[in-house]
């Protein structure tokens, strides 16, 4: 939602928002068809077939509300569109100039910070309240100064840089803080490189990673088709207000909460994985690290594959041809995600790798699912103008759509022969993607190893067919002349890349793309929707369902509430992500959500994804904690979306156990470790637990947006004291827990100590993570939406 974009004028037949914002919506794309010339059209037709009802709901909203701009499906990723088109940097409204700002319901909204616009992600719950006129509150953050010096070495990419920065900042600890980048090294970074670093703020944990406006920013604004008059206005305003950084002038030392520094020449080629974005692996150490992961016990860096099984070879037949799979073999290679597809250097770099490889006669194995999903149509224009798209096509990297794909779990099905070979033989298969997240179960249920890499490295790993390779000493493949081809033989120099970028990325491409963006496409334009300002709910719909949050709601706030004799629904360790809590990807055929859909006549091929069905609370409640890689300590080592129903000792799906607790009138809580709720700003990761009856979450620490979402849904967030957790306190999860809170909100303070009592006799102190008085008011009302609606009704009387 962009601040103060109320420029559409008044229309008595439309609903005026309570705050002057523009709501911009985009859509992800599932990769059903890949390695095909008509993949874009085929995937788009399938998207409209599956999602017609959802798209119709969004189109109805764009007609019913002012300032609701729907970027039609197939147009790109909203963060890239924001960077290239929507971002103002400075607003000029009715003769008043003021800085641009934006909040978005996707955590990677932070990408706009690379353009010098203050922006960050919030939970969907918070955003819904903002649209109802509720201001956002936050504790004033600390600001970490990150000094950049030097220059990237030849062959090192922006992706290598951002993975290095992510590891450094995650280790430093920047959750809930702002990071500001500064130093003479800034002048060596293109705007696209800066946007890549800003984009991954959620992965390093910061609220935003900010790059102040300088000459590089102004050059990018001109490149992307902003008028000379607008750029001049931006520079003049920011200089007058001392918000412009001019590296030709002496630098003023700034004061920060803490300081970090990186010499860009120290950055080396790398990937991150196999299960977390901040687990960086230098490329030269990848083979050794991979074998360590096979050996290590199951964890973030381990698969516990027995030594005798590590060299296993599985023979299978792929489309009539004999084929083989080993541990570490790549089955998905995707150039995807706003993090990298907005950066011409790495995109054209990947295309140059493809060109050199194709000319030497290298090929990608046909069973590897390769794909290219640009974040905007501009990418296609410069790939075609450069003449390089054909080489990507030759290696199977055909364009599959414009939007979030593999990175969010929309990788589509693997060929049945490949899927069977993996699942029947317990192969640790790999995906390599130019994305920003690689959490377990996110990319694809069958790829247990998922590595983040630059687009050129995605092409290289696709050619090699395995992550079990040392690119320094081992060949990527054998050329048509029978000689070994190494990575160095197909890797372009920085000068080569810069030359192609300079001659093929042009302002007219941006102008032409965005002049057409709101015109939609034939399928979108042909959607017919009602013109009413009140939506008609269809009770039989499995996509759009009237939410239950306001049923039985009265005008009187219910007041604060504690927890009495609650059972532990789930007992987790560290780094439980929002993908573990509320998956966005495919709906497993044996899951409660699948049962629900089949009972309503939905065929398995039409299950679609959880992300596509997030408008239906019945599906999403059943999808809560449905990640097939979920590790719940109550199961004593078993992995999967199950838990133990403590009173009976039965092993049930999480949903079934939660419903049994609810029907028996028993409350539940969750125990967790550090970084609970990291990853996507997924509001369903709080809405789902609320619908399951969860009253409180006790964790070592929370990721910022998820804690805010829990507060917004009226779930009590509590933190163990430093040095303590469930294990050190001897808690097994089989206890019953009581949390006493005063029944008057005026008697509760933000961040106060709260005593938790277990029926085992254990008693421990936690910090109550309502961080502001406003959050306590939300709790008093049972949640932020109830608070906003009561205030809205009260104000109207």
Image (tube, grey):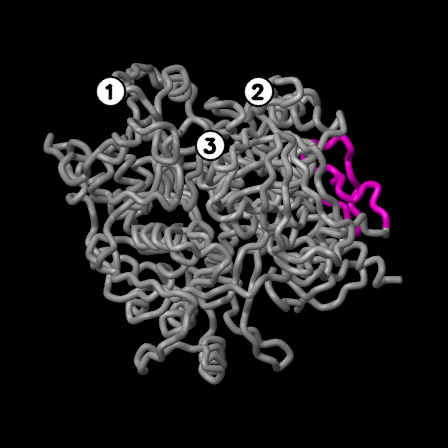
First in sequence: mark 1 vs mark 2:
1
- Above or below residue 474? Residue 634 is above
Q: Is residue 546 magenta?
A: yes
Residue 311's label in the rendered image is 1
Please indicate, yes or no, whether residue 311 appears anywhere in the rendered image.
yes
* Main secondary structure found in the magenta portion: loop
Q: Residue at x 70, y 55 (%)?
A: 748
In this image, 76 relative to 335: left or right? Answer: right
Q: CA distance from mark 1 to mark 2?
A: 31 Å
State the residue in front, 286 or 637. Answer: 637
Q: CA distance from mark 3 to mark 1?
A: 24 Å
**Image quadrant occupied by the N terminus:** bottom right
Instruction: Assign a secondary structure to mark 1.
Output: loop
Q: Please state the horizontal and vertical placement of residue 777, each as a whole percent of the image.
A: 73, 56
Mark 3 crowd level (few <14, some 14–19, many ≥20, 10 Å Cα): many
Q: Please state the horizontal and vertical placement of residue 323, each as a whole percent of the image.
A: 29, 18
First in sequence: mark 3 vs mark 1:
1
Q: Which residues are magenta?
A: 529-554
């Amino acid at each position: 939602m962009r601040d103060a974009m109320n420029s559409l004028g008044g229309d008595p037949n439309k609903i005026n928002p309570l705050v002057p914002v523009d709501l911009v919506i985009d859509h992800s794309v599932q990769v059903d068809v890949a390695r095909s010339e008509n993949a874009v059209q085929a995937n788009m037709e399938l998207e409209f077939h599956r999602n017609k009802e959802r798209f119709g709901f969004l189109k109805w909203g764009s007609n019913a509300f002012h300032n609701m701009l729907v970027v039609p499906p197939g147009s790109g990723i909203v963060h890239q569109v924001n960077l290239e088109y929507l971002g103002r940097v400075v607003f000029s409204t009715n003769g008043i100039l003021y800085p641009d700002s934006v909040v978005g319901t996707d955590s990677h909204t932070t990408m706009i910070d690379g353009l010098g616009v203050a922006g960050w992600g919030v939970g969907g719950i918070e955003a819904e309240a903002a649209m109802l006129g509720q201001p956002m509150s936050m504790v004033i953050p600390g600001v970490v100064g990150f000094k950049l010096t030097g220059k990237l070495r030849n062959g090192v990419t922006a992706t290598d840089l951002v993975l290095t920065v992510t590891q450094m900042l995650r280790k430093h600890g920047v959750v809930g803080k702002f990071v500001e980048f500064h130093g003479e090294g800034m002048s060596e970074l293109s705007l696209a490189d800066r946007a890549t670093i800003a984009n991954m703020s959620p992965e390093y944990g910061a609220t935003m990673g900010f790059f102040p406006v300088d000459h590089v920013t102004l050059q990018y604004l001109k490149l992307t088709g902003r008028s000379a008059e607008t750029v001049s206005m931006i520079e003049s305003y920011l200089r007058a207000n001392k918000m412009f950084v001019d590296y030709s002038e002496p630098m003023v030392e700034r004061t920060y909460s803490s300081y970090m520094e990186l010499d860009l020449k120290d950055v080396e080629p790398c990937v991150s994985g196999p299960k977390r974005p901040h687990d960086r692996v230098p490329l030269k150490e990848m083979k050794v690290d991979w074998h360590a992961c096979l050996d290590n016990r199951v964890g973030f860096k381990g698969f516990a594959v027995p030594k005798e099984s590590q060299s296993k070879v599985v023979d299978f037949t792929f489309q009539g041809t004999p084929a083989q799979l080993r541990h570490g073999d790549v089955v998905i290679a995707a150039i995807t995600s706003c993090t990298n597809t907005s950066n011409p250097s790495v995109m054209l770099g990947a295309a140059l790798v493809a060109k050199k490889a194709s000319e030497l006669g290298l090929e990608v194995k046909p069973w590897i699912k390769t794909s290219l999903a640009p974040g905007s149509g501009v990418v296609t224009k410069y790939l075609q103008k450069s003449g390089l798209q054909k080489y990507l096509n030759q290696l199977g990297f055909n364009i599959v759509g414009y939007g979030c794909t593999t990175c969010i779990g929309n990788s589509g099905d693997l060929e049945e022969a490949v899927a069977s070979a993996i699942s029947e033989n317990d192969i640790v298969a790999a995906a390599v993607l130019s994305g920003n997240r690689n959490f377990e179960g996110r990319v694809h249920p069958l790829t247990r190893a998922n590595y983040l890499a630059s687009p050129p490295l995605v092409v290289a790993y696709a050619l090699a067919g395995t992550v079990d390779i040392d690119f320094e000493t081992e060949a990527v493949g054998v050329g048509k002349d029978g000689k070994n081809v190494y990575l160095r033989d197909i890797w372009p120099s920085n000068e080569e890349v810069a030359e192609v970028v300079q001659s093929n990325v042009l302002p007219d491409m941006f102008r032409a793309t965005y002049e057409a963006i709101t015109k939609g496409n034939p399928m979108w334009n042909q959607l017919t929707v009602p013109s009413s300002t009140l939506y008609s709910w269809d009770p039989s719909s499995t996509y759009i369902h009237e939410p239950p949050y306001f049923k039985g709601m009265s005008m009187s706030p219910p007041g604060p509430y504690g927890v009495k004799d609650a059972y532990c629904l789930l007992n987790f360790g560290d780094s439980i992500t929002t993908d573990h809590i509320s998956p966005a990807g495919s709906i497993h055929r044996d899951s409660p959500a699948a049962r629900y859909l089949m009972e309503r006549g939905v065929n398995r091929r039409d299950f679609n994804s959880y992300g596509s069905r997030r408008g239906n609370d019945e599906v999403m409640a059943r999808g809560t904690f449905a990640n097939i890689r979920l590790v719940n300590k109550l199961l004593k080592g078993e992995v999967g979306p199950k838990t133990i129903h403590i009173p009976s000792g039965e092993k049930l799906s999480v949903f079934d156990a939660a419903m049994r607790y609810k029907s028996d009138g028993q409350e539940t809580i969750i125990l967790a470790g550090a970084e609970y709720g990291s990853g996507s700003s997924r509001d369903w990761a709080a809405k789902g637990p609320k619908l399951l009856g969860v009253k409180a979450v006790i964790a070592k620490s929370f990721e910022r947006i998820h804690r805010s979402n829990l507060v917004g849904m009226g779930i009590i967030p509590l933190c163990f004291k430093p040095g303590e957790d469930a294990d050190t306190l001897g808690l097994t999860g089989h206890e019953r827990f009581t949390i006493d809170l005063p029944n008057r909100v005026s008697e509760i303070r933000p961040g106060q100590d709260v005593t938790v009592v277990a029926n085992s006799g254990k008693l421990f102190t936690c910090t109550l993570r309502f961080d502001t008085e406003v959050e306590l008011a939300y709790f008093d009302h049972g949640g932020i939406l109830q608070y906003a609606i009561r205030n809205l009704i009260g104000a109207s009387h």
